[in-house]
Amino acid sequence: MGKRNRNRPRNGGGRDGGADGKRSRDAGWGAGYADIVKENKLFEQYYQELKIVPEGEFEEFMEAMREPLPATIRITGYKSHAKEILHTLKEKYFKEIQDLEIDGQKIEAPQALTWYPDEQAWHTNMSRKILRKSPLLEKFHQFLVSETESGNISRQEAVSMIPPLLLKIEPHHKILDMCAAPGSKTAQLIEMLHSDMDVPFPEGFVIANDVDNKRCYLLVHQAKRLNSPCIMVVNHDASCIPRLLVEQNGKKDVLFYDRVLCDVPCSGDGTMRKNIDVWKKWTTSNSLHLHGLQLRIAVRGVEQLAVGGRMVYSTCSLNPIEDEAVIASLLEKSEGALELVDASADLPGLKYMPGITSWKLMTKEGQWYSDWSEVPTSRHTQIRPTMFPPTDPEKLQSLKLERCMRILPHHQNTGGFFVAVLVKKSPMPWNRRQPKFRNKEATPSSEAAQAEEPPAEEGDRETPAEAHPCIADAPENPPEPEAKKDGVCGPPPSKKMKLFGFKEDPFVFLTEDDPVFPPIQAFYDLTSDFPKLNVLTRTHEGKKRHLYMVSKELRNVLLNNSERMKVINTGVKVWSRNNDGEQFGCAFRLAQEGIYTLNPYIRARVINISVEDVKVLLTEENPFFSRLGDDSHAQAKKLEMGSVVLRYQPDPKDPSTPQCPIELCGWRGKTSIRAFVPRNERLHYLRMIGVEVFRDKQGKKEGGASESQEGNKEDMEEPGQEGDVPGEEESDAEQNGSADSKTNNSEDVSST
């Protein structure tokens, strides 16, 4: 095994250099690599020869590649508050920006992406430097940061938003995101599952996978902002991600996904506008090294796809070796089981170039090859037959590669991107054929395998090795179709699954007779259809500190695959333990993260509040009952001490008030009431009701103390200093958040 080239970017620079990669987090907002020269002669020579850019546009293409990438934001579409946020953006911030001049330069207001539905995505050329030069722009920047942290806005590159849209997600779909970190596309998938906010548990779910253990936690952070019970983060090599089992009608079946997102690691040359270091590091070797991995991941994706399901393959590379070559090889291997779909009508307004049907291959030394037959034997380990287009004109035409979509930076001021949509029409050919030993006398190992693995429906039964947690089903250098027919009866021997990274706490579901649940059921008067078997905790022993919920379908996956997969995180927190909670009738208080999940099932401990009540609760730490409106005051006095739901219902007759429901977690004390809401969510709700919260550039409050000083003082305070709120098992973000926003002290709060 040869030495690894130290200068070679890991994974070819692909995931970190991807369309929403970690290194580029701030690049669109003015951060940059000013000392790197944006020149690469090999890059220009390569793409001029391939003719992926229309004739006469190459100079314009290169000029766009050297320009900074516009910053783009996306309003999270599934939240019931999306329309309110859009209204705030358009009517307040964008209008203020429109007539603004800084240093004699007129600021261009953000523009909606024409191809993204319902004006939910916007782009702007404003840099961080410009954002900080004007108080109005600084307010806009703080708004973006705050709403991003609370999960209501995502800062995501425009082209990165395309694959989830082309998947056409519906709430009942089971979705696999194969290479998910850092998670902005995963967030889109979750939003689409929750398109109907009246349904707390959609039938579908998202399993988000990444090979890098540390990046899985970045993925968890992204997903947690959306508070969904339908997301599971797992840690596996995507090229051999295990096949999972689910129980249906009393027997175990193989889980096939309705939708698969295959956004593979890539060389990332479409991201040069924000990942400036790609200019210096780019060579054709990156694509040659990654092609085999990309093909293996794509093969594994279509194996896990249900018949009739849809898979989107995407890269942030413009190179046909990583793009059309992978799709062509995949279609050839499928022998008609896959169809490349024309998705041009799915995103009206998106400008793209059709896929190409002819390309050549170049080494980093500048040597060109047009066909596999030209490649010398000494190069056969780096260059493979699957990297070239099919030589048979009829076969090439039948693949319809022109249905692929390549987005070029100069057409709509975006990054470069490639996307292809595949539909599975029948089981993959190697799944249809049973290994020969099954038809002969059974060996002990085959009997054990058959006993372990249930038959799949419609003839898509897997071989014992395929069902094993980790198998290289698609070798990097697959044999030609002719060689494949010479008696190869099954996939290669299984490999032992390796688990790296931190050891996760267990996921333990409550049992039917768990003593922890009856007091919760009685205290909150939960409806009879509350799915208590979907409640889980993260410990086998001792007191349960937090209770989480997952959907029924994810519970099925968890219970039947504990030995097959490494789960990093799943579930949304719905209750947290209080130290002295029993004296109030229940040891568990509500958690703000899970309030919208629990809301349909809670019939007691609810106080209906007005817009003015929302303002009081979020700007004062422990307001007395008398600070509330008469109706809310009367409701609060009737309740015993303990956790409560503070519920605002919109009034259609008053369009000046928020036209979406607001649910807040609170605590009813002896004489006062308190909202347990994280700081950024608190600011979000205040903005929705017309209250602006703004910190100046020095982070000073009215009294002159700095923001950090105020924060430190607040962090040390115990919640419930009146004696109204019992101590918590541990300091939650919700407590810190509620302490952060004291009675208008640390914020400059004004009605707008």
Image (cartoon, grey):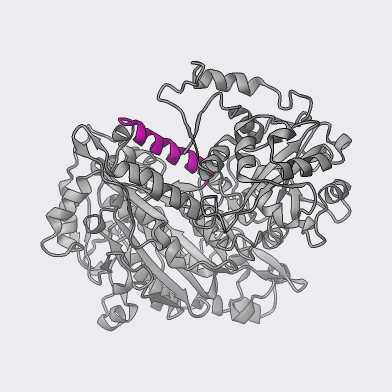
Q: Nearer the viewer, residue 226 or 390?
A: 226
Q: Is residue 483 left or right of residue 320?
A: right
Residue 50 versus residue 84 in the image, above or below: below
- Assess whether residue 144 is covered by the magenta stretch: yes
Q: Which residues are magenta?
A: 132-151
Q: Nearer the viewer, residue 514 or 437?
A: 514
Q: Which residue ends up furthest to the bottom in the rendered image?
A: 394
- Assess whether residue 728 is covered by the magenta stretch: no
Q: Residue 367: x percent and y percent?
A: 17, 56
Q: Residue 501: x percent and y percent?
A: 58, 40
Q: Which residue ends up furthest to the top in the rendered image?
A: 704
Q: Residue 319: x percent and y percent?
A: 28, 58
**Quarter of the image where one finds residue 358:** bottom left
Majority secondary structure of magenta residues: helix
Residue 197 versus residue 706 in the image, above or below: below
Q: Nearer the viewer, residue 137 or 512?
A: 137
Q: Could you tell me how many numbered marks the image carries? A: 0
Residue 434 versus residue 646 in the image, above or below: below
Q: Is residue 485 left or right of residue 347?
A: right
Q: Nearer the viewer, residue 646 or 240?
A: 646
Q: Is residue 1 visible?
A: no
Q: Is residue 319 left or right of residue 610?
A: left
Residue found 61% across the figure and 64% down from its top = 204
Q: Is residue 534 visible?
A: yes
Residue found 50% across the figure and 78% down from its top = 429
Q: Residue 210: x percent and y percent?
A: 51, 50
**Quarter of the image where one finds residue 467:** bottom right
